[in-house]
Each structure stands twice: as structure tokens, then as C-alpha cells.
């Protein structure tokens, strides 16, 4: 991936499969991805999960639960968790 000042690299670990193939994606394993600078957590989740976004339950950045409106920074570690089933 070519890096420029308008992009950031973050590390994502997702427990939800993406709708379309994502380079480096493996369920539950961290991978690096380049995103536009200024992207929010919600924007990243939308880009990766697309129509599978309805499976998204919890989002965390650097180990802390975060709101979708959070603007991501270079090197952030993002975790995307599915809704929990059970009762």
C-alpha cells in the first residue's frame, strides 16, 4: 500500500466477516489497513463490514469501548465485536 499524508494506517481485529474480501482479513486476527485521514470509527466499520454492519455489537479503540463518531488516529487498534447471543 502506498502511504501518503491523506491516509492513516490502523490495526483492526474483527469478529464479524466482511461482506467483500479485505486484504489481510482473518476472523479474530489483527491486520493493518490504510484508511483516509479523518475517518471515524463508524466510517471504518461501514467500509469493512458493508451490509454485515447489522451484526456489529461493540466497537473498541485501543482497548476501550468507543463511540462511532470517534475520529481515528494513526496506529489505533480497533476491535469489532458481534452482538452476543444467549439468555
Image (tube, helix red, strand yellow):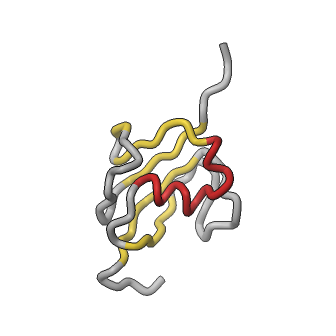
To which quarter of the image does residue 55 belong?
top right
Q: Classify 33 as above or below 69.
A: below
Which residue is at 61% across, 27% downward? 84
**Residue sticking out furthest to the top:** 87
Which residue is at 58% across, 42% downward? 56
**Residue sticking out furthest to the front:** 69
The C terminus appears in which quarter of the rendering? Answer: top right
To which quarter of the image does residue 86 belong?
top right
Which residue is at 43% across, 86% downward? 2
Residue 67 at x, y = what percent?
37, 42
Residue 18 at x, y = what percent?
66, 57
To which quarter of the image does residue 71 belong?
bottom left
Q: Classify 34 as above or below 3.
A: above
Residue 50 or residue 21, whichever sits in front: 50
Q: Classify 44 as above or below 34.
A: above
Which residue is at 36% across, 50% downward? 69
Q: How many marks?
A: 0
Residue 38 at x, y = what percent?
33, 67
Q: Classify 25 as above or below 61.
A: below
Q: Is residue 82 left or right of residue 2?
A: right
Amino acid at each position: 500500500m502506498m502511504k501518503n499524508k491523506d491516509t492513516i494506517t490502523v490495526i483492526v481485529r474483527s469478529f464479524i466477516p466482511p461482506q467483500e474480501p479485505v486484504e489481510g482479513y482473518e476472523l479474530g486476527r489483527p491486520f493493518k489497513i490504510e484508511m483516509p485521514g479523518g475517518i471515524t470509527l463508524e466510517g471504518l466499520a461501514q467500509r469493512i463490514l458493508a451490509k454485515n454492519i447489522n451484526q456489529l455489537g461493540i466497537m473498541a479503540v485501543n482497548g476501550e469501548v468507543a463511540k462511532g463518531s470517534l475520529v481515528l488516529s494513526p496506529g489505533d487498534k480497533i476491535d469489532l465485536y458481534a452482538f452476543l447471543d444467549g439468555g
